[in-house]
Each structure stands twice: as structure tokens, then as C-alpha cells.
Amino acid sequence: MNNRILLLGGTGFVGRCIAHVLSARGYSVTVPTRRRERARDLLLLPTVEVVERDVHDAATLGGLCEGRDAVINAVGILQSRRGVPYGPDFARVHVELPKKVVAACRARGVGRIVHVSALKAASDGPSMYLRSKGDGEAAIRAGEPDIAATILQPSVIFGPGDSFLNLFAGLARVAPLLPLACPDARFQPVFVEDVARAAVDALGDAQSCGKTWQLCGPTVYTLRQLVEYVCRLSGLSRPVIGLSPGLSRLQAGMMELLPGGLMSRDNVDSMTLDNVCGACVQPDVWAPTALEAVAPGYIGRHVPREAYGSFRARAGR
Ligand SMILES: NC(=O)c1ccc[n+]([C@@H]2O[C@H](COP(=O)([O-])OP(=O)(O)OC[C@H]3O[C@@H](n4cnc5c(N)ncnc54)[C@H](OP(=O)(O)O)[C@@H]3O)[C@@H](O)[C@H]2O)c1
């Protein structure tokens, strides 16, 4: 069993959940973060250690990998400055960091990586996000066969504290109507706890080495259906006005000028591809949780934690 785990991105929405599953299964976990005070709830987990470190520094990352059995990488961002084939922020976080992780694993004899990517990641994808995720996957695969890797490709992820359904719930609270970019884009939302369980299951599953698991929920929805569902759960009657592709880009371009990174032209580019599985490659045991079983528990309810995201965005953190 791989007992000692370095969990990168363990303070995030997905990573936090992975940390809980790892801890519940008795793994010893180290979570590096840029700001330790943001991870106070993780400090309560008995087998989890949170340390303030710069994981982009090769020597620091090497030190973190020392004595580990496996690394789980759940570091990611949704917005970047622009660039070709992707902007510098995506390059640093989605491509350079995985390269450094592989180099550090190689140098310290760590033979196992579980890497959280994204559905439709591809080096020739339609958006900077998807292209950088594709190149990140290639960087992880370049470590094989010495470093056995499982790559997870989730569709959009929901759960308490998500930034997807909660974004639209927040907009519905303040706007009398919702002009919606890419209303016909299709998603197959997957529950954050299912993603976390898959990440931890992969660690103990030799069959998952070399595989890419596509993680999707049981149902496909258009973006319009999801937003209308969020409005219903919130008890708000809000007309949803679907925008044409041209207006979607225009709206996203204007939103890029606002603080908080709500939406970008790059997000619109990502949504030109359906975010759904065809013939999915999934874990052997995969019984995904329905959105309707979870979302009513946190959308339309006052969950104080959910306000933190907007506070942080306003403070530029
Ligand atoms: N959420 C979704 O719907 C979704 C869907 C598909 C794929 N994914 C992928 O799943 C992974 C996790 O996403 P998430 O939603 O959990 O993201 P998140 O909540 O924004 O968390 C991001 C994590 O990455 C770390 N991080 C961010 N920028 C960093 C930087 N410049 N340097 C070092 N660490 C940095 C953060 O650590 P600190 O701030 O503590 O340092 C945090 O732990 C990402 O790879 C994402 O692309 C997410």
C-alpha cells in the first residue's frame, strides 16, 4: 500500500475532499499550500499535515517528495492571462508544475502519480485551458514507465462549495434576468466526493496505472437546464436569455475586465466542446451520484463557507 502521500492542491475544492478520503482511509498526507491559514479545517484531520511551501521551487518540491509513496496532483486554475498556445499562468500551473512533479518523483524514487486533469483536455483543444491541461497530461505520461500514472478527467464538478452551480446561484440572487453564454453547451456534472474517491481508489489499484479515467455523472444537461435548475432550487424565477456565440464571447470579454474571474473568452472557447463522456473509460466500480441527490442540500441555502470565495475574489486572493 502507498501510505505516505504528497497531495498538491489539497486545499482546493477537489483536493480538500481527497484529503478527507485519504485521512479516513488511514493514509498519512502532506498538503503544501501558499497560505496555511486557508486550510484550517484540514488541520483537524488526524493524519493530515499542512505546510506552507512554494511547490514551484524545484528544491522545495524535491524535499516534499522525499519519503513519499505517491503524489496526487490536484493543482489547477480556471483563468490565465492570454497567450499562444496558452497564457503564462496556465503554462506555469498546468504544464511546468507537472513537469517539475515528474522530475522530483524521479529524483526521489517516487513511483506513483495520480493527476487531476479535465475532460476534453488535448494539446490541440479549442481553449488555452484544455490545451494546457493536455500538455500537462503529456508531461505526466513522459514519466512512465518509471513513474506509474493515473490521470483523472472529470467533467464539471459539483458539491458544497463548488464554483459552478454556486456561481449561477449567486448571479440569480442579484440579477433580475440571466443572459447566458453558451446556453446549449452540454455537461455531465460529477460529484466532488465521487472524484475524490476515484483519486484514492486509483492509488490502490494497479490496474489504473497507465489509464485515463473519465469521470462523469449519470446525466447530461445543457448549461441552460443547469441554470434553470439552480434558479428553481433557489426559489427564484429568473428568465434565462441564451446568447448567440458572438454575444457569448462579447459578454465573456466584458466579464474579464471585472475582478473575480467569473467568466472569460477562454471559458467560452472550452464550451465549444461538449463536456460529456461518450464511451467513457471509468473506474471498474463507478456508480456516480446524481446531481439532484446533492444540490438541494447546498443550493438555495445559506452556507456561510460559500461566501468565502467571493470575499477572496474581491480581496484579490
Ligand atoms: N472544479 C471543477 O469543476 C473541475 C472540473 C474539471 C477539472 N478540474 C480540475 O481539478 C483540479 C482541482 O480543481 P479545484 O476546483 O479543486 O480548484 P481550486 O478549488 O481552485 O483549488 C486549486 C488548488 O490549486 C492550488 N493552486 C492554485 N493556483 C496555484 C499556484 N499558482 N501555485 C500553486 N498552487 C496553486 C491551490 O492551493 P493554495 O491556494 O492553497 O496554494 C488549491 O489547492 C484542477 O486541476 C482543475 O483543473 C476541476
Image (cartoon, rainbow, N blue to C red):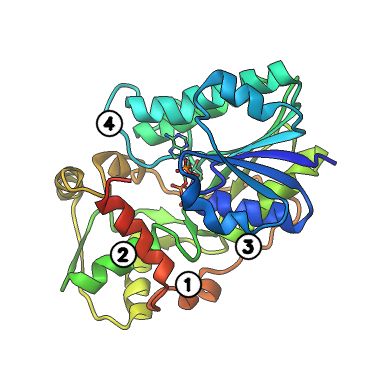
Dot 2, how many residues are within 10 Å of its Cα: few (below 14), some (14-19), or many (20+)? some
Some atom of ligand 1 lies within 8 Å of the CB belonging to the residue at label 4: no
At 57% from the left and 46% from the top, the residue drawn is 10
Quadrant of residue 8 in the image? Answer: top right
Q: Earlier in the sequence, mark 1 or mark 2?
A: 2
The answer for how far apart the CA atoms under marks 4 and 2 are is: 24 Å
Foreground tag (3 vs 4): 4
The answer for how far apart the CA atoms under marks 3 and 2 are is: 23 Å
Which residue position holds label 2?
168
Residue 55 rendering spot, x and y as whole percentages: 53, 29
The answer for how far apart the CA atoms under marks 4 and 1 are is: 32 Å
Can the viewer see residue 28 in this picture? yes
Which residue position holds label 4?
81
At 64% from the left and 51% from the top, the residue drawn is 19
Which residue position holds label 1?
295
Foreground tag (4 vs 1): 4
Q: Is residue 244 above or below residue 130?
A: below
Q: Amino acid at mark 4?
A: Arg
Q: Are marks 3 and 1 in contact (CB under 8 Å)?
A: no
Which residue position holds label 3?
288
Foreground tag (3 vs 1): 1
Q: Amino acid at mark 2?
A: Phe
The quarter of the image holding the N terminus is top right
Can the viewer see residue 141 in this picture? no
Q: Earlier in the sequence, mark 3 or mark 4?
A: 4
Q: Earlier in the sequence, mark 4 or mark 1?
A: 4
Q: Are marks 4 and 1 in contact (CB under 8 Å)?
A: no
